[in-house]
Image (spheres, rainbow, N blue to C red):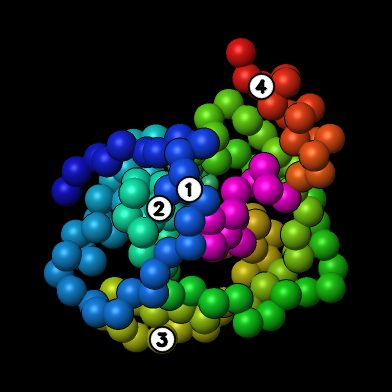
């Protein structure tokens, strides 16, 4: 296992769409292990493949490890199959945009279908922080960042405050 370098915005790879995972290999398991190690080392709760230059539809998440309730999960080929009408706004940080918190409004509850490392398909609902995190990481697989959710005005404001 190894801690990988996290790409930072505006690296163009962060704006690309990722390719589906076709085969469930030892290399993919090694990549996911590196993603967990990199996420924990950066004190994050989620990390997507493109953030370390691995352009596959995979992200890892551990919503509770900082509260002593670790729940490491790897999501391959995730698809959001339900989005609630109800919306929620949360301040979202991103390991690829250090120092910036963006207020992003998203569906407050979702249902996700994904595959595990052995190719098994899972379906589960997410709400609260989990829903925010899953949608944030899933966005990365389509080349979408928190800044892309903001109006031009809000984006300029956030960057003016946070960038030196
Ligand atoms: Zn992010």
The residue singled out by tag 2 in the image is 50
Tag 1 near tag 2, CB within 8 Å: yes
- Lateral position of residue 159 relative to residue 139, left or right: right
Q: CA distance from mark 3 to mark 1?
A: 26 Å
The one of 139 and 13 positioned closer to us in this rendering: 13
Q: CA distance from mark 1 to mark 2?
A: 6 Å
Q: Dividing the picture into quarters, in which one does residue 139 lie?
A: bottom right
The residue singled out by tag 3 in the image is 121
Tag 3 near tag 1, CB within 8 Å: no
The residue singled out by tag 4 in the image is 162
Tag 4 near tag 1, CB within 8 Å: no
Task: Give the secondary structure at mark 3.
Answer: strand
Q: Where, quadrant-wise, is the C terminus in this rendering?
A: top right
Q: CA distance from mark 4 to mark 1?
A: 19 Å
Disc sitting over residue 14 in the figure = 1
Disc sitting over residue 147 in the figure = none
Q: CA distance from mark 3 to mark 4?
A: 40 Å
Tag 4 near tag 2, CB within 8 Å: no
Q: Position of residue 80 (x, y in %)?
A: 60, 76
Q: Earlier in the sequence, mark 4 or mark 1?
A: 1
Q: Is residue 117 above or below residue 152?
A: below
- Lateral position of residue 6 relative to residue 143, left or right: left
Q: Position of residue 126 (x, y in %)?
A: 62, 69
């Amino acid at each position: 296992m190894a801690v990988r370098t996290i790409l930072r915005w505006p690296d163009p790879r962060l704006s690309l769409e990722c390719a589906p995972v076709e085969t469930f290999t030892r290399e993919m398991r090694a990549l996911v292990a590196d993603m967990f190690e990199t996420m924990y080392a950066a004190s994050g709760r989620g990390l997507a493949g493109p953030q370390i230059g691995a352009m596959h539809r995979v992200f890892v998440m551990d919503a509770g490890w900082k509260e002593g309730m670790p729940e490491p999960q790897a999501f391959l080929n995730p698809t959001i199959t339900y989005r609630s009408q109800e919306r929620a706004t949360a301040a979202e940080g991103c390991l690829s945009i250090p120092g910036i918190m963006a207020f992003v409004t998203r569906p407050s509850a979702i249902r996700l279908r994904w595959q595990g490392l052995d190719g098994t398909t899972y379906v589960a609902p997410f709400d609260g922080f989990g829903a925010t995190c899953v949608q944030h990481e899933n966005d990365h697989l389509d080349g979408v960042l928190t800044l892309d959710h903001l109006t031009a005005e809000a984006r300029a404001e956030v960057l003016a405050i946070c960038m030196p």
